[in-house]
Amino acid sequence: MNKRNMTEGAPWRHILRFAVPVLLGSVLQQLYSTVDTVIVGKCLGEAALSAVGTTGSFSFLLLAVALGFSAGNGVVVAQYYGAGDEKNVRAAASVGILFLFGLGAAAALLGVAVARPAYTWLIKVPADFLPQTITYFRIYALGLVFQYGYNVFSSILRAVGDSRATLLFLLISSVLNILLDLLFVAVFSWGVAGAAAATVISQAASCAAANFYMRRRYPVFRFRFRDYRWSGRLAAQTVKIGFPIAVQMIVVSLGMTLIQRAVNGFGRAMTASFTVGQRIETYLNLPCNAFQTTLATYTGQNVGAGKTDRIRKGLRQTMLISLGLTLILSAVILLFTPQIISLFGVSPEAAGYCLRHLRAVTAVNHLILCLYFPVFGVFQGTNHSGLPTLVAMCSLSVRVIVTYLLRYSAFFGYTIIWWNGMFGFSVGFIVTWTFYLTGRWQKSASLTHVPS
């Protein structure tokens, strides 16, 4: 195996070297998602923008399974890799690929089937853009199999320390998505269906590119069709770690779906505003997410090598970097908020809502989030992936409860749509650091495998 090992040397060097490509890849993902939104808003208007935006939380619900189980499989592969067990690295990767592609096909069929009842009754999309919402989501859902495939390939590559390659795949996907958006929406006038088709095609391209690179770059992953083998033992290890992560993601998406429902109740301008605010707000999450992913691999490799003492040092250094990047991003967004909002072509009413939204989240919400979210990577890498799920459930429950309790109150009113994070993230911070400081995560950190 080509060693890209995080078990020797200064932790911060490994963490930055690994995290920067992950962070840049996430930026690319968000850029093409943002450009997609800008093109829809400018070319098709506020109703179409609201239709595309309101699909986000439920789309993430179906994608959560891919994120959870691919991350779980990545931790298993990373632990075997850290232990130098090439046989089980290959076997675990094979199981992960079979598992995720099977789940992806099921998710695609489910998404197409439930689109109308979900958006009509669960999320209560207003009638004036409900048909566009359903059209967009059904086409988007067909591409879930490619997203599941891309996620498992990327997790396997990250597990062996290769986070740079995913940047290339995302660059291919981003450029292709933007070009196809312009062609299908601006030139061919296919409406929201064109925007969805552009997304599906670009996701298929990134999935194919990731598979091609993994096979060419790493001999251990050169699977022929008959080489794919199912192992109940390795599948159980993937599920053991991945299931709590998937549940965490599902809880987050369900909570955001309920918040989206509350947003829709304030009318089209608020829905359009929330769509734009969420797109911009996502950039503030990028350092947290990148360092969580990095720490899961860093921790998994060090657990496999029996060097758990390096984990605390790596986390301390990571938290300082995460906070610094979040402060810089917050300052940039605060400085250019009006100009950024103007790119999306929303009405003055929606722009006013969005301005207040972004000032709230950059000043408070995400500064709290960046101080605990990366710790989830340590929990996942030490086989405590259930902890982030518990934290997510507590945080989202608080956010949803305060949203529905205070949305018509005299003090908060509709502003609770963006202030709910202050309450939820504060709870998440307390629960996360209380468990970490007990040290229980370190005492039971161990390799997940048993002799084969």
Image (cartoon, helix red, strand yellow):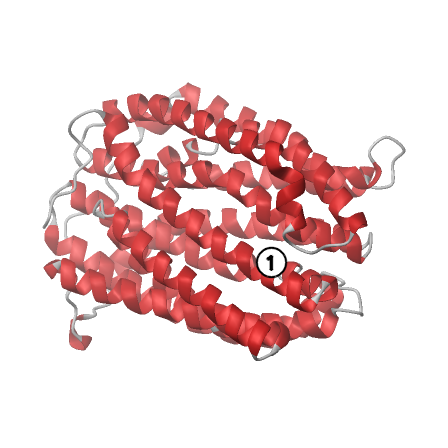
Q: Position of residue 7 (x, y in %)?
A: 18, 32
- Is residue 372 something one can see in this rendering? no
Left or right: 410 with respect to 336? Answer: right
Image-quadrant location for residue 308: top left
- Identify the secondary structure beneath mark 1: helix
In this rendering, is residue 61 above or below 286?
below
Q: Horizontal and vertical percent for residue 174?
A: 42, 60
> Does residue 19 appear anywhere in the picture?
yes
Q: Nearer the viewer, residue 412 or 176?
A: 176
The image shows residue 443, relative to residue 222, as above or below, that is above
- On the image, which quarter does residue 418 sit in? top right
- The amino acid beneath tag 1 is Val
Q: Left or right: 415 with respect to 200?
A: right
Drawn side of residue 443 relative to residue 305, left or right: right
* Residue plotted at (46% across, 68% down): 179
At 66% from the left and 38% from the top, the residue drawn is 358
Write down the quadrant of residue 110 in the picture. Answer: bottom right
The answer to which of 32 and 135 lies nearer the viewer is: 32
Residue 446 shown left or right of residue 325 in the figure = left
Please provide percent x and percent y for residue 365: 61, 31
- Seen in the picture, residue 280 relative to 269 is either above or below; the reply is above
Q: Compared to 17, does 363 lie above or below?
A: above
The residue under label 1 is 38
Residue 347: give x, y in percent of width and height: 77, 54
